[in-house]
Amino acid sequence: MTVRGPRTVGARPARRVRVDFARCRGVDAAVTESRATASSHRLSPLALARRLGRRASRAESKGKRTARQRLRQREVIAVIAVQSGLAAGLSWWIAHNLLGNPNPVFAPTAAVGTIAAALGQRTRRTVELLVGIGLGIAIGDGLVYLIGSGAWQTGVIVTLAIGIALGLAGRGGTIVSQVGGTAVLIATLSTSQRNLELPRIVDAVTGSLTGLIVVALLVPLNPIRIINRAVAPVFRTLAAQLRNLERALRTEDADRAIGAMEALRGMNPDVERMQDAIRGAEEVVTIAPVRWSRRKEFSRYDWGATHLLRVIDDCQDLARRAATALQYREPVSPDLCRAVEALADAVDQLYREVRTARPHARARRIALRAALHAGCAQSSGPATFGTAATTQIRVAASDLLRATGCSVDGANRRVRLAADLGRARAAGSTSDG
């Protein structure tokens, strides 16, 4: 852009000035950065050193967590690769040497397809594979008998087979793909090769069962390690955002509270991975005899994860109500901040106890401390959304207690007693004052 300067009487015309807006934005950014640096320099050297130390430790711990996650992913990939190779070779040997099939193509294919299915869905994948092959054989043979074989006949057979499979299954998946593949084989090879049906079924059964045997007996995954790997991000994010929400309440920062609320709502991918891991672990402890000793430990995880999902929902509602309270500039009780902080501590402690298989006594005490602070906050007479936030903390504390194994009545009773004690303490301190 070109800006013309003003003309002056008796003087030469002013020179044209070219304004580089990109450069101006860069100058503004540099000024902003220099101001931030100057404000940081106003800190005392000790405070600045502490801040830099905290940032360095956080970066180091994050790097270590990332490295551990990558190592664990490589371990899982290596195990699944070994399972697939072993199942493919073993199924081919069984079909060729023991069952007499000179060209057992479908046996290793079915074995690899079974193992490559998502963890927790292998048994269902095997059943769907066998059902799809049987249905494809029935539809293909029937239509070849009625309309014969050829180019247009193959198209008609596959169209009808896929349509029937989708109508029966209601969705795409293993059944539909196997129906279509088997119908293609029957329609195209029936003129040159006879009796394709029985070898196809035998190969499918051999490969699928071999894959399940390899998964169950020879190279079974550790179900507890699977769950530990999946629940870690859920616990870390939940505790971190609760602490972020506590800071938002303490500093009355509505934007930070909204950020915590959005982060809690964005936990769905981690939650889905946790649920998939639990389904996979359930499959392992069900079909793998060497992992049957882990059933009790798995049941404990399964119970805790069910109530952990409720805790996440409770914390999402808590963040929403806290953000609304800050937006309406409602007064924030210090006890409300302490209650949210105690709730974050309870989540952290529960994760440590779950990971090390220790009793949940300390996590229960911390959760009850959150309920006690919530009762103290309620006694101070908070406004509408503050009252709703304290109630939500009590609900989250009750669900945390249930995640540790408490019954519904026991958890609610203990939380109610803790909140009543908090109200009584707050009332006593007020009267003393």
Image: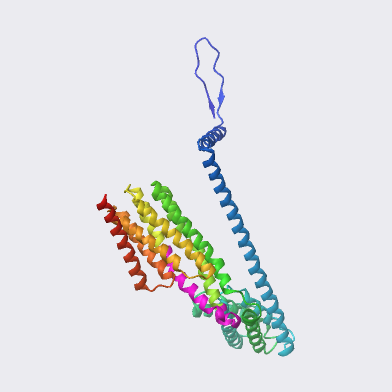
**Residue 263, how many percent across, how many down?**
46, 56
Position of residue 3 measured from the top left corner of the image (x, y, whole percent): 52, 25
Q: Residue 218 lies in what quarter of the image? A: bottom right
Q: Quadrant of the N terminus?
A: top right
Q: Is residue 431 left or right of residue 165?
A: left
Q: Position of residue 395 (x, y in %)?
A: 36, 64
Magenta stretch encompasses residue 303 = yes
The foreground one among 428 and 22 is 428
The segment highlighted magenta reads 284-313
Residue found at the far left of this picture: 431
| Viewer-nearest residue: 139 or 6 | 6
Q: Residue at x 56, y 81 (%)?
A: 292
Residue 119 lies, with reference to residue 389, above or below; the image says: below
Classified by dominant secondary structure, the portion drawn in magenta counts as helix
Q: Is residue 75 left or right of residue 423?
A: right
Say whether residue 75 is visible: yes
Q: How is the image coloured?
A: rainbow
Res 253 seen here: no
Outermost residue, front side: 432
Image quadrant assignment for residue 33 = top right
Left/right placement of residue 116 relative to residue 379 reads right
All told, the count of numbered labels is: 0
Residue 44 inside the magenta-drawn segment: no
User: What residue do we see at 58% from left, 55% from top?
Assistant: 61
Quadrant of the image occupied by residue 84: bottom right
- In this rendering, is residue 23 above or below 60? above
Which one is in front, 176 or 377?
A: 377
Q: Is residue 324 above or below residue 91?
A: above
Residue sitting at x 49%, y 59%? 237
Expressed as whole percent of the image width and height from the top left, the position of residue 353 reads: 50, 67
